[in-house]
Amino acid sequence: MHKPASKKTALLTHNLNYPLWLTLILWLVVACHQPNSEPFQLQNIHVTVPHQNHLSAILQFTTTISTVTEVLVQNDTHSVAIPTESTPNRDHTIHILGLRPQQTYTITLTATDKTGHSQQSEFPLQTDPLPDNFPPLQLISSQPEAMQPGITLFNPGRWIPHPDLKWGYLVGVDQTGNVIWYHKESCRINFFTQTQRGNLLYLCPPYRAVEINLFGETVHIWNPTELSQELRHFHHEFIEMPSGNLLALSTEMRTIGGYVDDDNQPVSHDLVGDVVVEFTPEGQLVNRWSIFDMIDPHRIKHGFEATFFYKLIYEDVSDAPRDWTHGNAIFYDETDDTVLASLRHQDWIIKFSRETGNLVWRFGEDGDFSLQGDGIWPTQQHAVKMLDDNTLLMFDNGTNRDGIQDANQLYSRVVQYRLDASSSTPQDWSASQIWEFRDKEAFYSPILSEADLMANGNILIADGARVSDLNKNVGAADNSKWARIIEVTGENTPEVVFELAIRDPIPQPDGVGYTVTRVEKLDDLYPH
């Protein structure tokens, strides 16, 4: 008998008690064919749907003796692979992930005891539509056979028309662009990554970093002030090291003299510079490195303006401090125990020793490398990574790119450089541009964005902040924003094999727009 319960918390309940005469007959049949087996029953079957992800379900049931179970979830167009239990139990909890919205599935539950005797039950599961405020997705193209297998995960942010700090999603789509996983948050998720355990780390700015598993359960929350009273906030990136320790970006403020004002008079400024911190999962601070100790604070490239956000962080200053470095990415290179930091307002990527904190090199214009060949330097880059072949991969936003006078000629790209720092004489260090992706039509995202190299050689890209008017400031309330996710081949002439836009098909009069900060490819949704 199938007895439906409430829609959200108990979709159905099965009572599998048989009449006494039928139970006796079944027992005799089993006893004849499997003399060492015991009859058992599946009982108390029910399914709950987590509130933060209606495309998942939790199947719970008991068996009268210890069994292992196998669960198959499928319909005519889609099936979900559920890991098989390996340890016999009487109480069973099975997480079902990877469902599509508004689908009716059949769940086939098979329990098997130690003698090989099995019991089976089938029942339906209906999934809900996506939430009303879910980001609008448009699949442009998809070639699954040419893509890196797995789930494409990204973090859309909403602008209404300013950044909505109380709205956030992580969204996972399959190779055909169907949503099969999401996690809803009460904050703007401005960065995420996957841990070695398969969990997800993300930032809820400015005051907490969160770890969840893919079942949506919170594993850990870190508050920067709990690590050190000197740490006012986390921003932009929060990653796990091979040791299990965590690296994060924070900031500090220093008052620096030696500048001159418009009348050529000496003046001091309150500068906000980046700090990289390392700490244990238990929250013990291990290392702290200040960018103030590595590069000259009088070097000014772009964005050296008073920033009201930092007035909120550093309440003890009378005027808004200046955003000097604006770090937006960190990367740990275990091959030589160094840390890379991308400094957007300096157009530089710097590398420093984790052990000593000493600067190793500065990559970019006026840095420690000469650029060979026909390439150009990046400007206001994001998501820098050192690859296994000692090359740098990044999303080059192209903001304030030299030589461009007309805003409509601005462009972004994904670019890869090979570095040669083998000489003992730094003056002989060189870099060469070896690959780039600009697309068939120029695209421009002045902020955010990412690029990842995948196992099959494809590059996964978050073209994260497209704007409707290139002549307006990206943050202008009336400059509507949208984003797209692209997967391209790593060939000399890259081919787009997947493209998904995050935007309303018809522009909304209330100015709602969307951006994306990061994108990752997950092998699957279950921990290994």
Image: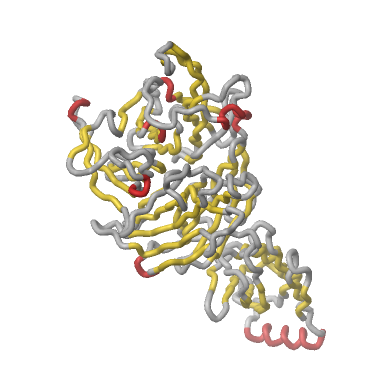
**Residue 509's spot in the image, x, y percent?**
59, 57
Q: Nearer the viewer, residue 480 or 425?
A: 480
Horizontal and vertical percent for residue 149? 41, 63
Residue drawn at point x = 54 percent, y = 74 percent = 79
For residue 3, which quarter of the picture? bottom right
Q: Nearer the viewer, residue 66 or 69?
A: 69
10 up-or-down from 221: above or below: below
- Structure colour scheme: secondary structure
Residue 173 seen in this snapshot:
yes
Would you say residue 108 is visible in this rendering? no
Q: Is residue 120 above or below residue 517?
A: below
Of residues 175 and 524, which is closer to you in this image?
175
Quarter of the image for residue 370 reads: top left
Corner quadrant of residue 489? bottom left
Q: Number of callouts in the render?
A: 0
Whether residue 301 is situated above or below residue 70 in the rendered picture:
above
Which image quadrant: the N terminus?
bottom right
Left or right of residue 374, residue 48 in this image: right
> Which percent across, then down, holds residue 209?
58, 40
Residue at left offset 30%, top offset 33%:
363
Q: Position of residue 355 (x, y in %)?
A: 40, 25
Q: Is residue 411 left or right of residue 29?
A: left
The furthest residue to the right: 20
